[in-house]
């Protein structure tokens, strides 16, 4: 894996191309306009306040609360969320009261 990261991909630059210091990866239209760097807390707050995020949280919350009502999920349980993706399940489990939630 380290070799892949450290070597220039052969698909971007032809092997016959001369070695030039200004050779770089292809750029998209988005590279021409600089983007403001957002700190992680601000970026998270922006995502977590969106309507789509709240809708997904409520959906997962309804799902997990069924298990909580059946006492399969209790506050003293520990949860490991595999393939957590955007983080909806761990956030919901933490919000409904689980003390230890780990997401991978």
Image: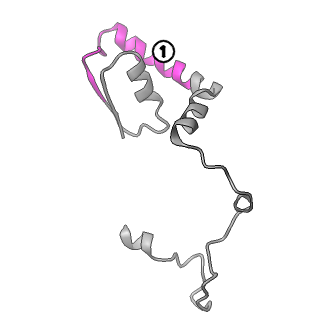
Classify mark 1: residues with Cα within 10 Å, few (<14), some (14-19) or many (20+).
few
Q: Which residue, given by chain and number where applicable, does mark 1 sit on?
A: 62
Drawn side of residue 33 relative to residue 15, left or right: right
Residue nearest the viewer, comparing 44 with 53:
44
Q: Is residue 84 above or below residue 14?
A: above
User: Where does residue 93 sit, x and y in percent of width and height?
Assistant: 39, 22
Q: Quadrant of residue 28?
A: bottom right
Q: Is residue 29 left or right of residue 85?
A: right
In the visual, does 14 lie left or right of 3? right
Kindly indicate the quadrant of the structure image that contains residue 20: bottom right
Q: Secondary structure at mark 1?
A: helix
Residue 73 within the magenta-colored segment of the rendering: yes
Q: Position of residue 72 (x, y in %)?
A: 29, 14
Residue drawn at the location 42% of the way across and 37% of the way down: 84
Which portion, as a residue range, is magenta? 56-79
Q: Quick check: 27 left or right of 75?
A: right
Between 7 and 40, the one lying in front of the other is: 40
Q: How is the image coloured?
A: one colour
Q: Percent position (x, y) of residue 104?
A: 36, 41
Q: Residue at point 57% right, 76% down?
A: 11
């Amino acid at each position: 894996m380290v070799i892949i990261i450290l070597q220039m991909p052969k698909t971007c630059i032809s092997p016959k191309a001369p070695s030039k210091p200004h050779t770089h990866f292809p750029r998209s239209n988005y590279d021409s306009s600089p983007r403001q760097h957002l700190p992680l807390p601000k970026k998270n707050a922006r995502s977590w306040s969106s309507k789509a995020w709240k809708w997904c949280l409520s959906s997962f919350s309804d799902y997990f609360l069924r298990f909580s009502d059946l006492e399969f999920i209790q506050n003293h349980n520990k949860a490991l969320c595999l393939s957590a993706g955007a983080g909806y399940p761990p956030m919901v489990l933490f919000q409904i009261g689980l003390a230890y939630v780990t997401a991978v």
